Each structure stands twice: as structure tokens, then as C-alpha cells.
Image (cartoon, rainbow, N blue to C red):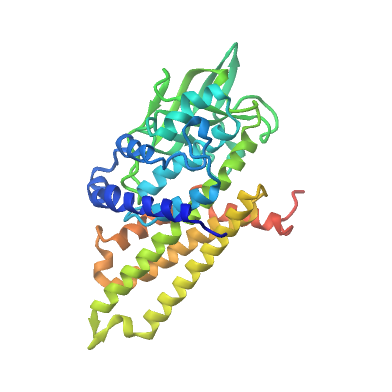
Amino acid sequence: MQLTQEHDALRTTVKNFVDNEMDPFVEEWENAGIAPLHSLFKKMGDLGLLGIHKPEAFGGSGLDYSYNLVFAEELGRAYGGSLPMAIGVQTDMATPALARFGSDELKREFLAPAVAGEMVACIGVSEPGAGSDVAGLKTTAKSDGDDYVINGSKMWITNATQADWICLLANTTEGNVHTNKSLIVVPLDTPGIEISKPLNKLGMRASDTGQIFFNDVRVPKRHCIGEENKGFTMQMMQFQEERMYAAASAHKGMERMIQNTIEWCKERHTFGQPVLNNQVVHFRLAELQTEVEALRALTWRACQQHVNGEDATYLASMAKLKSGRLWREVTDSCLQYWGGMGFMWDNPIARAYRDTRILSIAGGSDEMMLGIVAKHMDIFPKRR
């Protein structure tokens, strides 16, 4: 894609935000196990960063998705994955379906405040027994007059303890698992909702991730996004922006880890010469940078399809798969070259090693991405 001066200006704004409002506080938030999303999101909302590709009528900039990919790339520079993930939940996971299919009333009530940074949102798909298998979720939203009555639970919910509302995928009827689900906006202060304490995770330590329980939670049917029982299809569409966001946020983050490792290997000497002088080291770093460039090209190809209104599922799934696997390669190789310093808990490369492992699990596991790619290649075995 040909990027413009407007893309470059946005990139500069996001870079400055990361440098001034995120990186200086990463250690504090990591130690606290939580980042102050309401104050952080309000600053982002004031800069117009939470509604880049959302409708202008509801506070967004109305730009195409290529601008949001620039946004994701620069956020990925942050010295920790927790905040880019939390922000991505707001911009690319909880709100795309609402912006695309929600009623004007629902968008005024929930989308506009999310774009302004006045509300924090989360996405409720995964359950204790249904992660990548979205069709297998058990949470129900049964009809009762003009309301839904919701029962069930959602697991591994990013932003859970601070969110004002959840974009919830639930079974609204019986029958076919692909045509019985709806996306529903549920305010999290509604009676009957219980939110766990933040879960104790391997990585993404500054992100509050929790389990949410729904016990006879009553919300009006007007909170349904778009047409009832079309939620599975809407969520699959929503996943594509999530997966492109995940891939794009890896580009600059991996480059930063590679560059930091280069600088360290210039300074660190073994056997009378810099570690970087060893062919096994500089060749490996060159190879990793080549892989990052290949991922960038793939991600932007997927974005171009998406902007053109084409189905980007095939390339977006490839990019998501590649980003998770490449992060593991980059962090493992770079950590090795840092030696004992790489094994220290507060080293950015050690944090990246922990944080990015989730990318091959969340948002569709590597195995799910391979299945999608195989289906598009028409080599996935047919069900008997």
C-alpha cells in the first residue's frame, strides 16, 4: 500500500504517545499488575486514537483500516505487550461489530464513549470450555419479553476488572451452533454480574484479565448488535481486524527487540571481541529481520484486501499465525544472546519472551489458523 503524509503524521503521534505516556510507566504497571485504563484511554480519546476507523457521526475519524494498522504498528513498540493488547481490545475486538452493525441508539450509548475514551470495553467470547472453538460456547441469553436473561461465564477477559461494558457472544436460541448466537452489549454494572480478581498470568502482567459470571442478568433486547442470531458471522468478521492488529503490532516490537540485542551484542565482549562479531549471531539477527519484513508485507497485503472490501480471512489468518510463531523465534534467539542478563525478570527481552507467548493462543490458536488456511487451500479433510 502507498502510505500518505497523513499516515506518517498519525505514526508520529502514536510514537510520541508510547514514548511519553506508556514506556515511562511500564515498570510501575507491571509491578501493580494493572494499568489505569480510564485515564490512559481518555488521553488517547482526546488525541483521536481510539476511533481511527470508526464513523465520524460517533466521534471517529472515518478513515480506512490502513490508518489503524499504522496505529497498531507503533503501539507495538511499547516495552511490554499488556497495553497494546488492552488498547486493541477496545479498538479492534469489542467495537468493530458495534460500529458496523449496531443501531444508532446503541452506538450513541456505547460506541461514542468508547471512541472518546470515556468508557472501557471488553470482548466476551472465550469460556472455560470454549476458547478457539467459538461454536461450542455455552452462555445463553434467553428471551423474556423485551429483555434477554443471560446465564453463563466468560474466561480470560482482557480489561475485565476495569471495563464499563462487554460485547458478549451468547446463544440466543437452540439449534445450529453457527446460527443461534447473538452479539449483545452488556453494561458490567448490571445486577447479577460478578467479576473475578485479576488472573495470575505468565505474561501480560500489567493487563487485568478476569473471569466474568452472569447469573440471571437482564438486559434489553435493543442491546443486540444487528440482527439476532447473526452474532457468529459478525464475530468471525470482527476476528479479522483483531488478527491484522495482532500481526501489525508485532512488526515494530520485534524490530525494537532485535535492535536492542544488536546494541547489547556490540557492547558485550567474549574472548576478546564483541558478541556481534560471531557469524552465528549476526547471521541469525539478519535472518530474523528478514522474517519481520516478510511478515510486514503479508500483513499489509491482508490490509489492502480488507480496505478494498474483499475477504481477508486467508491472509489475515496467515499473518496472525506467522506473528505468533515469529515472536517466539525472535524473543528466544535474542534472549539467548543477552546471556544471563536476558534471564532477568525486568529485562524488556525477558518481558517480551513472556508476553508474546499468548499470541499463538489468544485470538485463535496457531492450530485454528492452520485449519483456516488449509480450508482455503481446499486440503482440509471433509467431515464424514
Q: Is residue 360 something that shows in the picture? A: no
In the rendered view, does 146 fall on the left or right side of 256? Answer: right
Q: Image point 60% across, 11% down: which residue?
A: 145
User: Where the N terminus falls, by quadrant?
Assistant: bottom right
Residue in the picture at 44% in, 39% down? 90
Measuring from the top left, give residue 146's x and y in whole percent: 58, 12
In the image, residue 18 sits, relative to residue 341, either above or below, namely: above
In the rendered structure, the answer to whether residue 98 lies left or right of residue 28 reads right
Farthest bottom residue in view: 272
Q: Residue furthest front?
A: 5
User: Residue 96, image x and y in percent?
Assistant: 54, 38
Q: Tell me where residue 374 sits by quadrant.
A: bottom right
Q: Quadrant of residue 132?
A: top right
Left/right placement of residue 288 relative to residue 141 reads left
Q: How many marks?
A: 0
In this view, the residue in front, 265 or 22, is 22
Q: Is residue 216 above or below residue 56?
A: above
Which residue occupies 41% across, 60% down?
252
Q: What percent of the width, then of the height, locates residue 259?
A: 34, 69
Q: Residue furthest top?
A: 145
Q: Nearer the viewer, residue 236 or 59?
A: 59
Is residue 115 visible in this depiction of the protein? yes
